[in-house]
Image (spheres, rainbow, N blue to C red):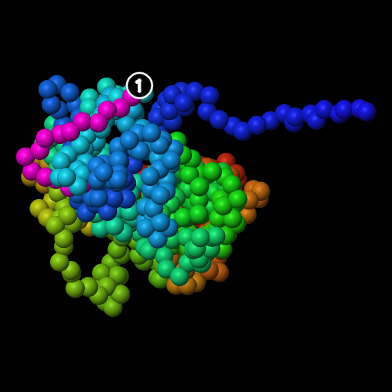
Amino acid sequence: MDIRKAKKKPGGRLKIGDDWNAINIIALSQNNPLKAVAEFVENSIDAHARNITITRGREKGAHYLRIVDDGDGIPLNGEGLPNFDYVATHICDSIKRQLRREDRKGIQGEFGIGLLSFWTVGEELVITSTGTDGRAYQMHMRKGEPSYRVTQKHLLFQSEGTELNIRPLLSGIRTLSGEKIQWYLASELRDRIRHSGVRVEVIDRPARKQYSVEPRQFGGRLLHDLPPVKGPSGDAYLELYLAPADPSHRVGLYRSGTRVLPDIATLHAFQREPWTSGYLEGIVDVTSLNLTPGTRDGIILDDAFAAFADAIAPLEEALRKHVEEQRRAEEERASRQVLKSVQKALREALLGLPAEEYDWFDIHSGRGRSDRPGAAVSPDDSEGEGNTLETPRQKQFFEFAGPLYSVRISPASCQLAVNAQRNFRAVARDQKHCLVEEQVAFRWNVLEGPAVLDTAEGEIVSLRARSEPGLCRLEVIATQGDLSCRGEAFITVTDSLLDDATPGAEYRQGLPGYTYRRAPGEVWRSRYDAENNLIVINNGHRDFVFASRNKALKLRYICRLFSKELVLKNFAGYPADQLLERMLELTLHTEEHLK
């Protein structure tokens, strides 16, 4: 008879080979001392404390950190004494697990390793709690030692709650200030502090300062009516705010009121819009997530996380719409500001350029009269209906001009027919380009050329060309007290000048606006839409994308597109080299005034 021996299958039950080595690994797994402090505070909140005081100080040359609360204290054993033995000998088996399910509501602790994180803060931990006999008892633990001891502490007055004392602090965190602790707890335990109503104070004795930990407040506009994020243990709590774009804006991931990650976008599954847009800040609180026990600043990517990532899709779609609306609104505001800057720079530039050559978009409309700020006024326009004065408004303080700094002649360059007459104006400004109008005297002089002035003084003079063509140089000297500056204009006198009052001048439009049309891959940068008086800019062009990285660079780029369209319209049919010369001329004068 064959006897078959049963073979034992290889395998067995996992167990700790070296308990003390395991405790070392657990105790040193917390890499953030502030997170350790937050865990101590959470233990106090779990013990139903109403007041928590964190004191940072120095005594007998040793830095210490003390946390005192008025909570329930360490749970008692059968003799009515603080059950320090259970705390010290049941690592990874939290005493809070013994509570009934209804009693554990709002309690965060679950791993039984929080106290061990004192190894990343200081050398020795002393916990003080009272028993039913009214006496105080202490448990002493030292970093790197496997033993603990319990002693009795003599107190003059009976105290409730728990006192936790760590000393001396590690060398690397002695500079940990009370302000840093305050800011960290305000974000890390934001909702735990809000929901529990606990009062947390931080006393920094070396700095002689005291702080109250107030739950962090977010800026921006609170978003309402967002789609719910449903999970196995209920809907996630959402508190999201829409704010102007800023790289510092982040959405934190929380669990039961405690922050797990300061930025949800650090998770690979959320490295996309809207979480990376910079327009959102706030919190997403999901109770079903499972934390990494050692550091407690990460989550396990298990089925619970996968269910959460799937359930958040409708919320992401709604948030993308809000972000896109905010982005469009910001672009519109930026476009209005850019348009205002470009138009102002163009108007200033045209003061120094030949009006007959750059008569564009109602810069000179009507019957040959210039509508530009500071442009010359003909004698026919000095009176009558087209020159009604508006009621002056009260100037603001910053609008009053300073001392004289510069003067220019408007126009600074022009053409004038033989025997014709034209008015020129002296424009005096201070260092901030404000118009200087008071106590300024002007002295005019024709330096050379076939022309004469009707007067040598005044803000506006009339110059008459003689019968022969030539180049004239006109000078003005402005004085204000001891200050003096000089401006010059160049006038080309010719006998073959076209009439300014061309047909249809009264129908010309003002300086155009601009709009965007996204056409990536196409070579055109801008086009002028004469029907709508708009410059259409290709915001998909690689040059626009490059310029948009910097606000000033984007402004100059758009200004150059305006200059390009102006030159193309005014000098249609000119050879390419002349168009480039005009482009350089207008760009130079425009960018001088661009802000």
Whole-percent x, y for residue 18 in the image? 49, 23
Q: Quadrant of residue 169?
A: top left
Is the residue marked by circle 1 packed among few (<14), some (14-19), or many (20+) residues within 10 Å?
few
Q: Residue furthest right?
A: 1
Q: Is residue 117 above or below residue 586?
A: above
Whole-percent x, y for residue 58 in the image? 15, 28
Whole-percent x, y for residue 77 in the image? 30, 44
Question: Which kind of residue does numbered mark 1 sit on?
Answer: Gly
Left or right? Give the position of 526 relative to 425. Answer: right
Q: Which residues are magenta?
A: 147-162
- Pick whichever, 541 or 418, lies toward us: 541
- Pick whichever, 208 or 493, lies toward us: 208
User: Which residue carries the number 1 mark?
Assistant: 144
Quarter of the picture holding the N terminus: top right
Q: Residue at x 40, y 37 (%)?
A: 90
Is 241 included in the stretch rendered in magenta? no
Q: Residue at x 50, y 71 (%)?
A: 503
The reply to whether residue 279 is in sight is no
Whole-percent x, y for residue 245 in the image? 41, 52
Q: Residue at x 48, y 48 (%)?
A: 264
Left or right? Give the position of 515 relative to 181. Answer: right
At mark 1, the secondary structure is: loop
Q: Residue at x 46, y 55 (%)?
A: 287
